[in-house]
Each structure stands twice: as structure tokens, then as C-alpha cells.
Amino acid sequence: MKNILLGNEAVARGAFEYGVTVASAYPGTPSTEITENIKKYENINTEWSPNEKVALEVGIGASIAGARTIVSMKHVGLNVAADALMSISYPGVNAGLLLAVADDPSQHSSQNEQDTRYYGMAAKVPVLEPSDSQECKDFVGHGLKISETFDTPVILRLNTRISHSQSMVELQEKVPYQLKEYDKNPNKYIVAPAVAKKRRVIAEERLRKLEEFAETTELNTVEYKNRDIGIITSGIAYQYSKEVLPDASYLKLGLSYPLPRKKITEFIKNCKIVYVIEELEPIMEEKIKSWGLSVIGKEVIPIIGELNQEIVRASVLRKTIDGVKSELSKEIPVRPPVLCPGCHHRGVFYVLKKLKLHVSGDIGCYTLAAFAPLSAMDTSICMGASIGMAFGFEKARGKEFSKKTVAVIGDSTFIHSGITALIDVVYNQGNTTVIILDNSTTAMTGHQDHPGTGCTIRGEKSHAVDFVALAKAIGIKRIQTVDAHDITELERIVLEETQAEEPSVIITKRPCVLLKNASLIHEPLSITGCKGCKACMKIGCPAISFSSGKAEIKKDLCVGCELCTRICEFDAIKKEA
Amino acid sequence: MNILLAAVGGQGAVLASRILGKMAQNSGLDVKVSEVHGMSQRGGSVVTYVRFGEKIHSPIIEKGTADIILAFEMLEGARYVEWLKPGGTLITSSQRIDPMPVITGTAEYPEDLEERIQALPIHYKVIDALTYAREAGNPKTINVVLIGALASTTDIEEEKWHTAIKESVPDKLADINLKAFKIGFEMSQLTKSNGENDEI
Ligand SMILES: Cc1ncc(C[n+]2csc(CCOP(=O)(O)OP(=O)(O)O)c2C)c(N)n1
Ligand code: SF4
Ligand code: SF4
């Protein structure tokens, strides 16, 4: 049976068909739907982990204990899990261990464009690159088999256009797979130098064997047509190239690391000009050139951003398609994402802006408060960084500066990687004030549960991390919890805690308005007797607009959170009569 | 067939593109749908691509090759006009949603938008999708009203659309969505598209 599936859905289907029984992940666009779909398969033990490192460690344990396992994350998640990946490379696996890692060229939802293939090279583990949903499913099977045959973890490299595109997939029956015996084998899995040095040699031999495998595997295909132009490519870049140059010859590398040297050399010999068309870094290109072979790559193909047909056409054929020409698009204002109407983060950042604090921010929906008109965040670097960085501010500029500084971090992000930094603040006697925005969800990636919500991925009730007790145990003495809605009380608390001569934690509580159980969503408000002072425009609520000297509330958008009523000094905003 | 859907995050463009994808699948065609998730959905610009035919390679539409743009908001439609091929069709909701830079006054919503779109060598159709969606019983069905409008410009049988809609929305919302489709389809037939550029 054929069905149209999202790339991520197809990866999940592959996990099901090829006998995966353990799946772990931390959400991150564009990888999230892999695990959200895997959870639908009852026989796969699935979890949202607190972060990617834990996810991979759970995966490694499951593999050694005999279960085929898939661990999913976005590209930057692999930075967090990198220690685990680098360390499991030499020992290898027992049952198949697949890391599904989704890159985000063009940074649709990410802080950088790092190329996951470098991790494959650094860890000396093979990298597979599917080019559509069918291959997403099939490559899960190939990956698990390679993992078991060569005793190695395997990376399945996805990207935004693979993960978030739907295409046709042939569904199959589940292949029977037996749990393997637990591999009790300290000589393999204790990476003390005595063992690890031996495994180092084995890992190198493994890479040689994988290079030989790359020469013969069906994952690497050659299609000879017109030999004037040959194209070496992988993943989504194959689809863009194929559409623009349907009659060229192709070497498509489904296994893009390690490379098949003989196959590539022969292909180049058989074609007049060979282009290497790869998205992001010139990884294949540089390797091929290091063999003394002549190919054209990043001389014409951009290194920054996603590729597409237009880019391939312009780079290789020096042509463009004549479409509708218009100057209009240049004059059209951008439409950046914004906090939802009624979002409780809004009031918090309104207060921080009002108090003119230095705000060491973090990553989540609340990062949107960094942009106009709130403009209430100074830094946002990587998940969990807010607390350590605020402490760094204090180390550089002293306690008085620290009294004008707060670290702001979401609940999911705090659990992901904020806790250890808070320990640092206490241990090394800082003053830092930390605000935890507890909206009971991982909102930014589409509302996943996390260890603080008291609910597992399947909706079973579980223990919810108690942030107050946790902060206490770390050694924080000043802890206050406040309704994110009550900005007057919040302002008082923030003033009090930033002035304190010791570290403090403020927890703002209110479920995200988009959650089904959110208590909010009241009648929309309306404005009568507006004096045109524009005070309400400072909070950046998309439901409020301003025209011909007056503010106005759009009924369709307003959720009645009443934040604006607390800001209007003329009492002009009220419930509709 | 290349259809580009341009919308504001939260307007239901992803569901609309899935309905189009299902319809193509049910017609036995090769199909690819490219969606966006994540950051861009918080009220930002959203663009999705639906492509179907004999064999589709890329999931995204190349500039200058879209047959139809289905715009959920006029500004968003205008943003992508260069993706249309000459003589292509822009179907847009008449809804106006100001982006944050316009709300805060750092940018302007081009007032002559409609006239300038009409001056382009394309077919153009405006439909008050929000009002019709309310008529259908739920303002959220603007996506399906617009699909109805799009359907009326093609010769694909109505039944195929109905099936795709039923397969894509929860059972309890099927009736309201079918109603939205019908209104979109009928109202669009009554709305004349601008004729003057028809020869292109
Ligand atoms: C290492 C890493 N993993 C995952 C992500 C994707 N991501 C960005 S923010 C975020 C969590 C946001 O949740 P929370 O901190 O609770 O804030 P909210 O969005 O709910 O306001 C995630 C998963 C990332 N940027 N980096
Ligand atoms: S999804 Fe929730 S947390 Fe994110 S901006 Fe909207 S209301 Fe705020
Ligand atoms: S208009 Fe006021 S009450 Fe309505 S959502 Fe915006 S801030 Fe809340």
C-alpha cells in the first residue's frame, strides 16, 4: 500500500517496520515529528528525554541491552550529545543504533547551519542521506543493518526539506526482529585507556571496511545518461539537480560518508565535466579534490543556505526562468513571527524592559521578546546559556552590574541544560537572579511534554520536577513563585530579588495559552475613549493595532488576557458590554 | 501542477496543503508537499508548496514556475508573485493582517497593493474567505474556503476534493469543512477573475 508521508513520519514508519523497540529524543525543529509519530506505535518504548545527551545515552544502553534503537534530534542537539557519540564510536553497538539528525540549512528555525556530516567524520561513523520520504523509511532499515554488521552507530542525516516534505511511500509489513542478548562485555564497553586503545584500532579497521562497502552498496547509485555533465550529489541536492538537469549522468551517494573512492574516480573518468552538488559544506568535494581529481563545486555552488532548482540552474547552466517580474516583493514589509496574543511571556518581558535590566536570555518562544516593540533581551546563544552567561556578566563587571541583570530561561530549557549553571552560581558564590518561565510545555517546538509537566510523551501521569524544591536543594535560599499574569507583583519581586546580595530564583507560572487546558481564553476586549498615547502598543500584541490616532483591538485575535488593561492609564480597555 | 500557498502562521496553510496532497494522491499522481513547522508558525510568513504530476523530484517550486498561488492574506500573496509563471493565477483572500513592523509603524502596508497586483500579467481573483468561513460556521475554515475557490478554477471532479477533505480533517469537523468548501467553490464561480490579461 502506498501513502503520502512526511519525511519524519516515514522515518518513524521505518523504525516500526525494521524492528526498533526503543526511541528517545529531545524535540527540535525540524526533527520533532519523528518521535511524535513513533509514539503511535505501541510496541516502541518512546520517550522525550530531558536533553539530547541523555537521549543518546538511553539509546546506547538500549542498543547494548539488545534493542534496535533510534535517537532523534536537530543538528545542534548533536552538539549536546557529542560526548556520547564520540565515546560510543570505538566500542560500537550490539543491536542497531541509529541517530536521526535533522539539519536546518537557511536557518528556518535555528541558530546556525552546522553540517552534521562533520560529526560523522569526527566520530568515524557512517552517514546516510535520504532524498525523499521513501528513502527516509528504507534508509532506517539500511542504517540499522549497517550498524549491526559493522558494529557502529549510524547517522541518518535529514534536513528541513526532507523532514518536512511529504511524498509517496510504499508501506510494508513489519520485519520480525528478536531482541538480542544483553552484551555483557566490559572489554568492549569500558572505555578506559586499556580497552579504548584497542577499540581505536578496530574503529579504524571498521572505517576501511565501510569504504569497501561504499563501493558496492545499493545505497550509492550510478545513472549514466549524457556524459558531458556528471553530477556527484547526495540527499535533497539530488532532487534539485535531477529536476534542472534530467539528462546528465549521476552518482548519487546515499551513503555519503565514507566515500567510495574507486567508484568516484571511475565516474569522473567517464564524464567530461563533473560537478559536486552538495548542500552546505564542501565535504565530498574537498575529499575528492584531495585525491587529485578534478571537479567543480563551491566555485559555483553557494556554501550558505539551502540549494534549490534556481540556484542549480544559475550555477551550472547560467540560466534563469522567465517568470512574472515585479518590484512589488521588494517593497513588502517582512512578517516576523511574534508572541501569540495572550502569551504570558509578554508581561514578563514588559516588566524587564520597564526596569531597564540587562537580560541574559535563552532559546524558546520567549526569544521573540528580543524583537521590537518589546526589545527586551540582550543575548540568546544556545540552550541553557542564559544562567552561565549572566554569572559571567557578574564576574566581569561585579555585583552592582549583577543587580541590574537577570537570566531568563524557559522551563523545558532549564531542565535541558540550565540546572548545572545554577549549581555553578551557588557554588561559586554569585548573585545572579534567574527567572524560570514555567508555561508547562516545550512550546516553541510544538508543545511537547517535559519532565516538569508531570506527563510523559504518551500522556501518562508522571512525577513533575518541583522547581522550588530543586532550587532549594541546589542551595538557593531566595525562591519566589508568581502568576505570570500578575505583572505588578512580578515587578515588585524582580526589584526585590535583583537587589538581594545572594542568588535567587523567580518562577513565573501559567500554562501557555495554546495548551488545551489553558485556563485563559476569555471574551475579547475592546477600547473606548482611547487617548492615543500608544502605551498599549509597547507590548507588541498582534491583536492591537493603531490607526488614525487611536488604538483598536481585533476581536478575532484577542484572547482577553487583560495584559493591555493593566498598561492603559486611562482605563480605556474593557470587556465588551 | 505547481501550487504555492502563502499565509500567515496559524491560518491553516499546512492543512490546506495536505488536503491538496491527498487529492493528488487519490488521483494516482506523483506528489510532493513541502511544509514549514516551528518558528515561522508564530504569526510569521508561511509558505508551503504542493506539486503533482507524472514524476516530481524537488518538493519546492522554482521561481517563475507556479501555476497557482493560493494566498490567505493579500500581502503574503504579493510577496510571492514572482514565483508565478506568466499567465498564472493568484487567488487571494481579501483579508488584511498587519505584520508587526506595520503595527509598530516602522513599515507600511502598501495601500495600492490590489491595483499593482492587477497590473501584472496574471489571472487574479479575490475572495472574502473570512466572511465565508464564518458563514460555514467556523472562521478557522478559511483554508478550506480557499481550497473551494481553487477547485472552481480546475477541472478536477468535485468528488475528489470532498474525499480529500474528509480524509484530512477529524470526523467531527468534516461537515463544517465540506460546507466551507462548497461556499468557497460557489462564491468563487460568481467572482469574475480579472479578464483583461486572459490572453497571456
Ligand atoms: C540543543 C538544542 N536542542 C533543541 C533546540 C530546539 N529548541 C529551541 S528552544 C526549545 C525549548 C523551548 O521550550 P521552553 O524553554 O520551555 O520555552 P517555551 O518555548 O515553552 O517558551 C527547543 C526544544 C535547540 N535550539 N537547541
Ligand atoms: S505558543 Fe505559547 S509560549 Fe509560545 S508564543 Fe504562543 S502563547 Fe507564548
Ligand atoms: S488585546 Fe489585550 S487582552 Fe487581547 S490578547 Fe492582546 S493584550 Fe491580551
Image (tube, coloured by chain):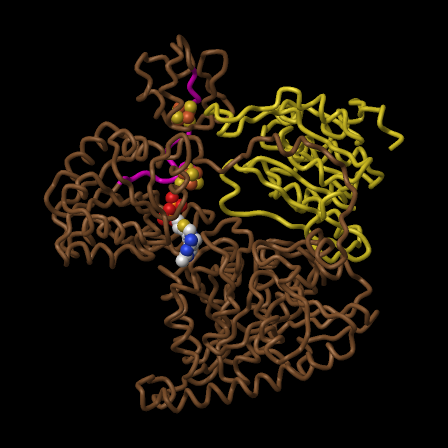
Q: Which residues are magenta?
A: A508-526
Asked whether residue A94 appears in the rendered view, the answer is yes
Above or below residue B132? Residue A101 is below
In which image quadrant can residue A64 be found?
bottom left
Side of A72 relative to B55 (left or right): left
Query: Which image quarter holds the C terminus of chain A?
Result: top left
Residue A468 percent across, percent down from the top left = 20, 48
Residue A333 or residue B2, whichever sits in front: A333
Q: Residue at x 29, y 35 (%)?
A: A484
Residue A336 or residue B70, whichever sits in front: A336
Asked whether residue A514 appears in the rendered view, the answer is no
Above or below residue B80? Residue A276 is below
Above or below residue A548? Residue B168 is below
Q: Main secondary structure of the magenta part?
A: loop
Q: How many marks?
A: 0
In which image quadrant can residue A384 be found?
bottom left
Query: Which image quarter holds the N terminus of chain A?
Result: bottom right
* Figure chain in brown: A
Residue B138 or residue A278, whichever sits in front: A278
- Was residue B138 drawn as part of the magenta stretch in this picture? no
Above or below residue A169? Residue A468 is above
Q: Residue at x 34, y 84 (%)?
A: A191
Q: Residue at x 30, y 52 (%)?
A: A414
Residue A317 percent across, percent down from the top left = 77, 57
- Ligand 3 shows up in the quarter that is top left
In the picture as drawn, the residue positioned furthest to the top comes out as A529
* Figure chain in yellow: B
- Was residue A512 drawn as part of the magenta stretch in this picture? yes
